[in-house]
Amino acid sequence: MADIGDIKASYDALDELWIRSLKNMFGDGVLLDITGARYNGDYNVPYLDAQRNKQKYVLKQIKFKKKDRILDIGSGWGPMLKVIKNEGGKAAGITLSPAQVKYCKQNKLDAFLLDWKEIDSKKENKQIDSIFNKPFNSIISIGAFEHFCSVEEMKEGKQEKIYRDFFKTASKLLDSKGMLYLQTMTWGGRGVPDLEKDIDSSAQLHSLKRIYGQWKAYFPGSWLPNNEEQIVAAAKPYFDLTRSEDGRLDYVETARVWIEAINAPGGCKKRLSWLKFLGKGLIRPELIARYKSVREDAFSRGFAYDMIGHRRLTFKKKK
């Protein structure tokens, strides 16, 4: 699994730049939702509306009601924590990003620096135990599942076990009627790339090999699920799949907006954010690789070329 160092490389180092870019484009009150929006086939829908559509869709899928207790695994900058709180629910989030925990707490959202694998072992912490001392009505996980298996774990044949353990843990945390909403990237219709033959960040610009290489650089420590079938098979002992939706094309448009925001001028504060990010790259070369992947539009190209897939999956706990 991607560890705290990997997640810090993926998210924390870009935190000021992401925040500044999105606030410049959409205003200071924007929810920092850095996951795929839901356009539902209509790409004339404004970006913020598409993100709201995704948030409403998630609440509908988990059959959300006021006062429900919701756990967000991989809660990011807290967009769903805030939505659930505003709708009268009680939400707690866990993430491996210190910057995200800090941001959530500054906005009076309950987020904790915690790995889902360590929930049981951390219950001696009174603050943690106060969250996990009774079942949740639902669990959501949006854009985190793709980080649960590392390249090394995949090579060691541990991928299916990691996914089964996740669903087993989720089942234990839910009440008897609990719902689980999972939104994740997968490898796309082109299949799972060969680690030795298909991935090369030094290959020709915009070639498939280079795009795969840029993706690997963008998400250090992570290996994507093969496909929906692999995920559903891992869930089968604990959950029934009730709905599946393909979000790949929605992510093409989502990523386009992000790149537009990153590349847009933003005055002195944004230039300072860029300089801070590049300064961090002097001591962490992997950040420069991530910078190149953003600049080369590898993110949206991966989805557009069906190299990367995207699934919205709704599960119901087995009785």
Image: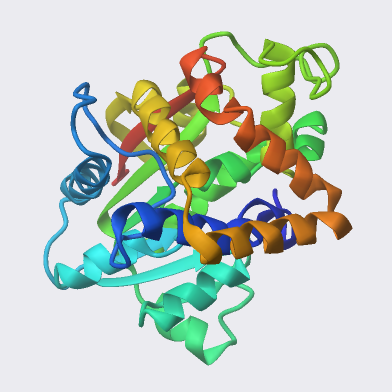
Classify 212 as above or below 121: above
Instruction: Kindly identify the residue that appears in the image at 24 percent across and 31 percent down.
Output: 39
Is residue 220 visible to the viewer in this orientation of the structure? Answer: yes
Q: Specify the color scheme.
A: rainbow
Is residue 32 visible to the viewer in this orientation of the structure? Answer: no
Residue 308 image offset from top left, x and y in percent: 54, 22
The furthest residue to the front = 267
Residue 109 image offset from top left, x and y in percent: 37, 77
The furthest residue to the bottom = 126
Instruction: Kindly identify the residue that appears in the image at 54 percent across and 49 percent down.
Output: 166
Instruction: Kindly identify the residue that appears in the image at 80 percent across and 54 percent down.
Output: 281
Classify 43 as above or below 70: above
Residue 155 image offset from top left, x and y in percent: 81, 30
**Is 214 situated left or right of 32 in this image?**
right
**Along the viewing direction, whichever of 106 and 170 lies nearer the viewer:** 106
Classify 108 as above or below 42: below
The number of callouts visible is: 0
Instruction: Kindly identify the residue that appears in the image at 35 percent across and 76 percent down.
Output: 134
Residue 263 image offset from top left, x and y in percent: 52, 42
**Along the viewing direction, whichever of 29 and 98 lies nearer the viewer:** 29
